[in-house]
Amino acid sequence: MTYLLQGDTGDWEVVIGLEVHAQVISNSKLFSGAATEFGGDPNAQVSFVDAGFPGMLPVINGVCVEQAVRTGLGLKARINLTSVFARKNYFYADLPQGYQISQYELPIVGEGELIIDLADGTSRAIGIERLHLEQDAGKSMHDQHPTKSYIDLNRSGVALMEIVSKPDLRSPEEAGAYIAKLRSILRYLGTCDGNMQEGSLRCDANVSVRPKGSTELRTRCEIKNVNSIRFVQQAIEYEARRHIEVYESGGTIDQETRLFDSAKVETRSMRSKEHAHDYRYFPDPDLLPLVLDPAMVETIRASLPELPDERKERYIKDFGLNSYDAGILVAEKANAAFFEAVAKGRDAKQAANWIMGDFFAALNATGRTIDDPPVTAAALGELLDLIKDGTLSGRLAKDVFALMVETGKGPAVLVEEKGLKQVTDTGAIEAAIDAVMAANPDKVAEVKAGKDKLIGWFVGQVMKSTGGKANPAMLNELLAKKFKG
Amino acid sequence: MSLDKKAVRSIAELARIEVPEDELESLAGELSNILSFVEQLAEANTDGVQPMTSVAAMTLPWRADVVNDGGYPTKVLANAPEPVTLDEGGFFTVPKVVE
Amino acid sequence: MSALENLTIAEAGRRLAKGDFTAVELTEAHVARMARFRHLNAYITETPEAAIAAAKASDERRRQGQAGGLEGIPLGIKDLFCTEGVQTTAASRILEGFKPQYESTVTQRLKAAGAVSLGKLNLDEFAMGSSNTTSAFGPVENPWKRKSAPATKLVPGGSSGGSAAAVAARIAMGATGTDTGGSIRQPASFCGIVGIKPTYGRCSRWGIVAFASSLDQAGPMARTVEDCALMLNAMAGHDAKDSTSAPIAVPDFARALTGDIRGLKVGIPAEYRPAGLSDEVAKVWDQGIEWLKAAGAIPVEISLPTTKYALPTYYIIAPAECSSNLARYDGVRFGLRVPGQTLDDMYRKTRAAGFGREVRRRILIGTYVLSAGYYDAYYAKAQKVRRLIADDFANAFKTVDVILTPTAPTPAFAQGENTDDPVTMWLNDVFTIPTSMAGLPGLSLPAGLSSDGLPLGLQLIGRPFDEETLFRVAGVMETAADFKALPEGV
């Protein structure tokens, strides 16, 4: 179903391409030996090379190259065995060399694809145009002083992978799904931690519109450095509507770069990038062409982990999960690992339901993460075992789970402590039934007269009198017998 | 190729070098002269020739991913015209940029 | 004239080892002489106290039996090499007062070999020039004078003009230079000394203020071929901090001076004898061919057809690379800052005030040839022609082992001559530029004097990483030339 925006003159389609900048996981920077850790003291992770001092020269970090190859393979993309670094020349305070070392005509990774999963259960392949390596810039702070901007170069020179999609996306939802899937893949591969708040994953959105059914590509605008999926979606919607308004009032859209103001939920033109940039790309004469050994590429290919799409297929096939549930569980590698640990040797669907329900809710409520959960996979697995062997009813198990979250204790311990073991002794259950029936002869009569609905009331009463421990199946069976007889 | 004042102004802006108005004309002349000189290259037949970006007949060497540089903010800031120095490092400063 | 400054590096080394004098005495002699020749303006920054302290340390090392290859030898360092704690200006206002917090690899290697630095030598601003008249710190004077007009100040050549003048005037036993299009060889020729631009990648570029990255190369300048070999031994070597540094072992270049060149084929390129070539220069070239024949070498006529395009190719590629390399001089982190209302204003004013006219000219040309719409016609085209130039040499070296040409089309000219038109000035490098474009090693040695008493140099061009053949042939030619002339007053 095509996403359409309604204008005065008719319906409009939105054409979106995303450029994602992903910081590479590595100890040191792309072309220098300075550290890449987030949050260091200002300018404490800066070498003379990063600061662009006279005579300084770049030397490439082999791990960054491997990470780019790994990512390219994860995106089913063509790996270019020869690629070239080019200088992108422009002036800005956070760009010490006066140029960024990037890749232009010959990037390390060529065309690939990424499958996006949408809420209606459908999936679509989105084309990847290319991936290239480049240096990150430093950070400018414009709010520390009335007349000065402060520059911290810690980030200057950190390796980035710029991943460019083809303009195949057609809605804010698709854009969000693309970023989510890309992020998931990068985290699975271990090539980027995808932390948008810290800025290790940043997104530029290229947006244009066209009348419904048209195949033309109109002028697009670039919205830079949006750092959350929600903001990307909001920015796209605002920008698309802006274009429509301009076209419908007879105007034209100028190609420009814009910023997204998340407080006002609008985009605006970037003043500092007024001049059409002439980056004067040329091959960096300090760096020779990057040549990859095909054997190295194959080694990386062979060592790729199972990626989200494959894992999802496996969950559907081997565990019988539905597409939606499988999709949720595989999105984060750590969640998937948790699920597999719980599901091992158990009812996978049950495990999935517990994880997606009570467990995720508990993570949210406690503010904990999957790396440090309030209930371990082993403990949850134990709980499911106790349901299976009849010790606990499903209902009671939920209560026990809540206690596990609160106290950090294991299920067996809690069952002992609270005496929550399910009652399965038919004699005891019968006795409880008899007691309730004896105390409520009028209701008994009503049931016998045909009011079957009241049986539920008896179930509730017996459950209450047994502290919820009566085995529900047995209780129902025995009640039915009593009323028949 | 002949450059006019407008072209020189534009190139000077790309290079962020202020050229006084009264020098633009003569500079345009100088640069045009140079371009005429180098344009004789167009005569050279380069069909099928690969561009040469480096005379070094080697491929790019890689370094190991170890942290062996940085960690000296005082030195990095030592030559700065207007640094802001703090105990734990410090910042370069520039005239405030409004985005 | 004290004897010590007249020694060669090789001789001084031997006599220091024997204990005839100390490194301190040798350095002090040079420091005293530097005062006498200050009018040449060869040094931008003299560091006499540091030099004497270094000489003392050298004598101590020698006492401990730890003498290096250049132990105690006082050298001058072209002010393009970053020297820790010592002002490094690149002869530009934009770096006036800049004291690097790091040491270039090449000067670090010279220190490790025990050499003493007398100070930082003058040059054309950012190494852009062939006369050392574009320095922000004043022009350098060539110690040589025309017989016909001894009062006329002559240029030492460039960009390593200060280095060449200092060695010629004996206020340094040797000096480091850099060569991008001829900046070691041409001043060596103008000042009657020896200079070699090694193969691209032989010496590390780390810590050398970059001009044109695919062409820049550090090299030694000294009074004899052997001295240059000794210096290159210390300067050369693979550096992991420079991605273009060749992972190739450094032979003992001094051992190449066997004196035997029998059977060696020497290429004589037709294109280096254009119609207008000065008679004197042609004569000294022919003389050079005779010396080589007499020593058993075989001259072979060769053709390097792309030669005539070398100059325009260079003047697209070098400015393009420099326009990008000099973008870092922006007033933010080091060097000159002229205040501005906005960031861009600060950039514009700083760079306008900091760069001289030649530098500005080259940055603007470079910016233009890389700009949108012009890249293919200029830069991409130049990169292709460059390959043709390199191929020419590669073909030639299938039939010859070394190539002999004049170094410069004229002897040293006067300050103020040739300055109207940048292109005319650039023609000074017509014989040296092709070697740089191909990344080959090139050596210049003094071969004779012009009729007006000025040095004329000859250039030897070798295969990649075959500096040894250059030294071998140059050694033979040096003996044959027996160039004993000295500038007046030196």
Image: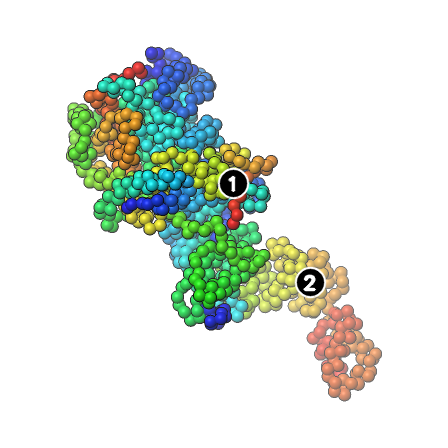
**Residue A144 shows in the view:** yes
Residue under the point 36% across and 35% down: C357
Residue under the point 19% across and 29% down: C278
The answer to whether residue C395 is left or right of residue C342 is left
**What kind of residue is marked 2?**
Phe
Horizontal and vertical percent position of residue C15: 36, 14
State the separation of the CA atoms marked 1 and 2. 57 Å
Q: How crowded is mark 2: few (under 14 residues within 10 Å), some or many (20 or more)?
A: many
**What kind of residue is marked 1?**
Val
Q: Are marks 1 and 2 on the same chain?
A: no
Local secondary structure at mark 2: helix
Q: Say which of A62 and A205 sits in front.
A: A205
Image mark 2: chain:
A
Q: Mark 2 points at which residue?
A: A401
Q: Say which of A215 and C228 sits in front.
A: A215
Q: Mark 1 points at which residue?
A: B94
Residue under the point 37% across and 49% down: A83
The answer to whether residue C473 is left or right of residue A414 is left
